[in-house]
Image (tube, rainbow, N blue to C red):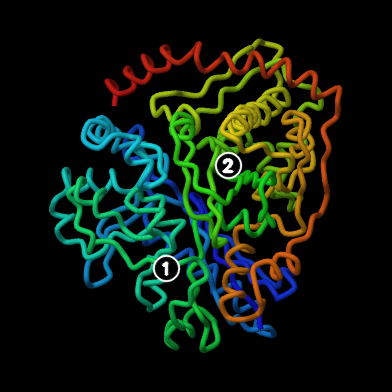
Amino acid sequence: MSLLGLDIGTTGCKAVVFNVEGEVLSGAYREYPLIHPRPGWAELDMNTVLRKIEESIQEASSQAKKDPVRAISISTQGEAFVPVDRGGNLLANSPISFDNRAKDFIPWWEETLGAERIMRITGMPLHPMFTLSKIMWLKKNHPDIYFKTWKFLCCEDLVIYKLGLTPTIDYSLASRTMAFDILNKKWSDEILSTAGIDKSLFPDVAPSGTIIGEIPREIANRLSLSSKVAVVTGGHDHPCGALGAGVKEEEVALDAIGTVECIAPIFKEPHLDKKMLEKGFACYPHVIPQFYITLAFNFTGGCLLKWFRDTFGEEEKEKAKRTGKDVYSILINEASYKSSSLFVLPHFTTTGTPYMDTASSGAILGLSLNTSKSDLIKAVLEGISFEMKYNLSLLEEVGMPISELRAIGGGAKSRKWLQLKADLYGKRIASLQVSEAASLGAAILAGVAVGEYKSIDEAVKTVVKKKEVFYPQKENMKIYEEKFQIYRDIYPTLRDLNHRINAIKEGIK
């Protein structure tokens, strides 16, 4: 029997079928478009997303008929939600993480309850990305939709519901709503009553790795699945990715190089202090019991390469079509081997930790008529990595030193970028035999739940394997440390100017 890990991302979904040794038997990927109805907003049409999820499950499962899927679990982006009526109809598009429509509620939260109290209950730093403030925005601006809503569902619980079962969300994803009590593991009465949102509008909660039920035969047939496939709670994508990368001890962390780049260390005791809050670091349940996890992240990760591809990469896209190679691999391989003289501030969507500044913008500094495409590609890779190097330094300040990073996601497929990161971070970077660790983490949870593994420890020892370790090169470390001292000054220097520019954007829209 095999295990299916479904990974629902911001711009695409993938279904991967693994055997119990962790080998990939089949996989399918589908993209879907982001919708930007106005500046600062970003949505997904969840009907389109569900259709793409169905296609990916169907394709992956049909290719694994010799080793039928026994259980399925879900790794998913956080914060995104959709209102659903009693008939199962989706009533609106789904605002995603870096949608900032709820930013005007933040001063209200600060005055009404205070960021420190919110952090102590929910583990979340006060920010408009989280689900609850966007539900409040919906109630205020579209009461017709709000009062038709039966449940507000995030991606995991929505998919479980569409698989014919009771909508259920795990602790890690529930935490990303800013409505969950992370110590008592339940929806917070205090937070929800303050927000004026009825608790009954939220789904059931359960620990990661809980069997919710079996997919009804009619739905299983449509998805090319056999009968009696168990559906198991998974988790937020970064905790799932950390599990799939074998991160189960302190001082080892995940580096998820996807649309959003995220570094995720784990720890046994919850950190809910002011230092964490000041740096924008969340604290919430990991998908491994008895552990917590935090995220140091930038919303503009791999999506900056996608922007570069779509804006300047016609030649590379044509080459990819001719050769069958991945267009991102082509772009990265064209990057200059020497350090770029340019600096890129990778705030092209909004910022992540520590600034949590919805009004910041990206910048490219040092351009001249001698600037080449290869210089610019290298500067993009460096800029994304410098932002995460700064976050690594802040994690050390709050007592979370990291000696090794396990790289996953699309960026982990590039040896050139991983060596750059090792040099720039001054730390070991390990790639893995299975780079799509979020899907593998979900599959591990499914496998433990149905008894294919005796424990998570046994599962990790069985299926997680390092592919290559990249060590920092001293000469390059020195160059990047000097550049980093300049990089750290860019955001503070440009902050006021960026805010003025964004005020102009607001006036033009």
Kindly tell me whether residue 430 is visible in this rendering: yes
- Residue type at numbered disc 2: Cys
- Asked whether 68 or 263 is in front, the reply is 263
Task: Count residues near mark 2 (Cα–Cα under 10 Å), then give few for <14, some for 14-19, many for 20+.
Answer: many
Residue 262, label in figure: 2
Residue 457 x %, y %:
69, 66
Q: Residues within 10 Å of mark 1 (few under 14, many from 20)?
A: many
Give the residue type at disc 1: Ala
Q: Quadrant of the C terminus?
A: top left
Q: Residue at x 25, y 59 (%)?
A: 91
Foreground of the two, 208 or 141: 208
Quarter location, residue 58: bottom right
Residue 35 figure quarter: top left
- Mark pair 1, 2: CA separation: 25 Å
The residue sitting at 24% across, 55% down in the picture is 189
- Residue drawn at 52 percent across, 18 percent down: 491
Describe residue 43's horizontal placement relative to residue 395 as left or right.
left
**Could you tell me which secondary element the residue under label 2 belongs to?**
strand
Q: Quadrant of residue 479?
A: top right
Mark drawn on residue 206: 1
Picture coordinates of residue 15, whole percent (x, y): 58, 66
Q: Give the label on residue 313, or none.
A: none
Locate the N terminus and report the quarter of the image it occupies: bottom right
Give the vertical position of 103 relative to 64 (above or below).
above
Q: Nearer the viewer, residue 127 or 121?
A: 121
